[in-house]
Image (cartoon, rainbow, N blue to C red):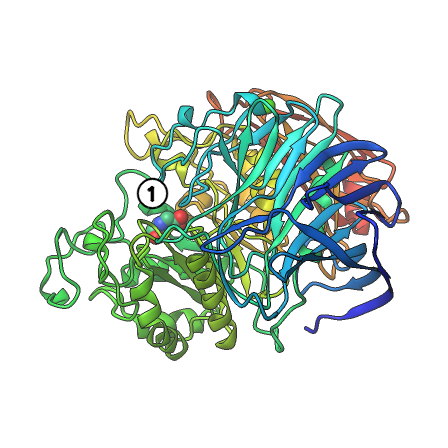
Amino acid sequence: MKKKILLSTLIIFSIVCTLNAATLLSPNKNLKLEFQLTPSGEPEYSFFYREKAVILPSKMGFELKNMPSFVNGFQIHKIDTLTFDQTWEPIWGEVRQIRNHYNEMLVCLEQKSTQRTMKIRFRLFDDGLGFRYEFDKQQNLSYFQIMEEFTQFALTADHKAFWIPGDYDTNEYYYTTTKLSEVDASKVDGSGIGTHGYFAKNAVQSPLMMKTDNGLYINIFEAALIDYPAMQLLIDQKKLVLTSSLVPSAVGVKAFMQTPQNTPWRTIIVSDKATDILASKMILNLNEPCKIKDTDFIKPQKFIGIWWAMHVPNKWSWNYAHEPNIKLKDTDWNALKPLPQHGAKTENVKRYVDFAAANGIPSVLVEGWNVGWEDWMGNWKEEVFDFVTPYPDFDVKEIHRYAASKGVKIIMHHETSASVTNYERRLDKAIEFMKENGYEAVKTGYVGRIIPRGEYHDGQWMVNHYIRVAEKMAENKIMLDAHEPVRPTGLHRTYPNWLACEAARGNEFNAWSAGNPPEHETILPFTRLMGGPMDYTPGIFEIKMSYYQPGNPCQVHTTLAKQLALYVTMYSPLQMAADLPENYEKRMDAFQFIKDVAVDWDDTKYIEAEPGDYITVARKAKNTDDWFVGAITDENARMAVIPFNFLDAKQWYVATIYSDAENADWKENPMAYKIQKFLVNSKSILKQKLAPGGGAAISLKKATKEEMKELKKL
Ligand code: NOJ
Ligand code: CA
């Protein structure tokens, strides 16, 4: 598949500026950006939606190490503006075509006292603003170190915010909803998260989703995070000003720069409709086009895995033996006494391959296949895994022969235990091993404290590492799914082999912690998913962990029907059917939805949404006439209203509705579902009841003549 640019216009004009201010309008004129220099030459911007301020005058600039700062003393040298309008086709995505339409203003600033320049490039779209700082190659600025970035977002009031604590290592928190003035990161329970620690009570992470009292939705984030640390936000709880706070390096410096270099884009998406926030493609548009020439190897897909059985109680293990305090180099793995519960055994893998083959699932992930899991966590040690030595009971050749005979692929797992030096050292060999054995995709993982010691998951060094891995995998035609990386910022436009990331609190937390509150999946699309797809691992049918271990209080905080709906509401080109095959085999009627649902789309319609409360979305499967709808709610029951006006007006469709049974409830009765079929057309409107913590999943296919006779109209 080739990325096509379909239409493009570019109009450029430039003004040599003597003024201290400039204004830019969005293409539809609803958004306005104002830039100005204060009397002391500080750059400042403000941002308006339909004439109303969203961001009050806000400062921009940097503190540098052992150098005069980039805060004031600026003059405007020149301002270039242009209009850009291009429609492009992503390799995979929520829609077939994306329009990249903006007005741009490049403000070229000169700091006379230091003879240095800094540019600020603003792009104003119909749905939001992006801006970044650019440092040209110049005589008085080559190497420099950023100690802090002072980008501010001065808000107009004490908005409601959906936030997770500012943390340099993890985003695996549940969300808290409070006014900005009430944010207190110390009140958030981080237990269950491997490596965590808030760095200030009043700091939160981006994407930050907010709602004003007047019903305006504001999302602050960043795009194209490359060679720079992630941006978190410090809240001035009196003035209601957010200031960027960058994740530090091991030596305290925030970013090591060499001109020419740019920062990532700072983004503000805004609308009075929550559905517009979800539909925004601005983050993707601010990323560079696809850098991969031959993208045929990139295949959106579903997978199952030797995985959930290690997360639920009393079932399987990653480790082969019980040997804490083991050393990778000096261990004779064949001499160890195997545990009966080791998951990644050849016979278990074959059973999963059989299930995948029988149900049209292309791939099987296998975790715990390689030596080192006996002692992989918590010791901050460098040599944990080598990524090429299977356990004695995992017959790699036989497994691949067997899988190939059934048309199934095995997904590689590289848990690095955050020993990134070790991973980089061994990566070439690990890739060679994958290629020799026919692996086409890899899931990476970064559980633990980072080595090089002192670096953080979201710092500049690690940001570069994740991209290095994505590039290397692309060179070798391998698809990538990264767990515990920095949260994505739209880089999947540039590297579409990077199908998904975790980088948030996934379904797995429900197996062994207080879990994810029922509202969690109604917030993630407004926050974490703004930057790219998540490997959330939906599809859990056996909801309560007491099934595996009597008395165990953990459970998935949704109904079974909501687990189905997540395949549509949590957009990802890589979707796991995460539960155990035997749990699916007991409910093959419900599993049919997971078999049928697409992972790549021609079109997407967000029907209704409210962060923290509900989301309903319809998507048209790529290259077909089939549609799929997902509707989810938080802990409150709700009536989702779904007009089928997106359907082909000339056709009747069969709607298969997988919904909560009458008496379903996430807590008391989560596994009660019903499946109904009706004929619908573009005029039909479905009123669908969702149970507390519930949801509904609907597949829509054109009706055959027989179905027209047999089935009732809605
Ligand atoms: C955490 C990941 O999110 C999970 O998917 C994986 O199974 C474990 N780490 C082990 O790598
Ligand atoms: Ca709610």
Instruction: Quadrant for the N terminus, please.
Output: bottom right
Query: What percent of the width, then of the height, locates residue 68?
Result: 53, 53
**397 left or right of 140 in image:** left
**247 left or right of 387 in image:** right
Amino acid carrying label 1: it is: Thr
**700 left or right of 430 in image:** right
Instruction: Kindly indicate the quadrant of the structure image that contains residue 116.
Output: bottom right
Q: Residue furthest right?
A: 650
Q: In the image, what residue occupies the spot 27% across and 60% down?
A: 345
Residue corresponding to mark 1: 195
* Front-lying residue, 557 or 560: 557
* Front-lying residue, 135 or 655: 135
Query: What percent of the width, then of the height, locates residue 202?
Result: 48, 29
Q: In the image, what residue occupies the spot 13% across and 57% down?
A: 326
* Front-lying residue, 596 or 418: 418
Q: In the image, what residue occupies the spot 20% across and 66% down?
A: 392
Mark 1: which secondary structure? loop
* Front-lying residue, 426 or 141: 141
Query: What percent of the width, then of the height, locates residue 104?
Result: 79, 56
Query: What percent of the width, then of the height, locates residue 643?
Result: 81, 35
Rendered view: 527 above or below 660: below
Rendered view: 70 above or below 187: below
Q: In the image, what residue occupies the spot 71% across and 70% down?
A: 3
Instruction: Quadrant for the C terminus, please.
Output: top right
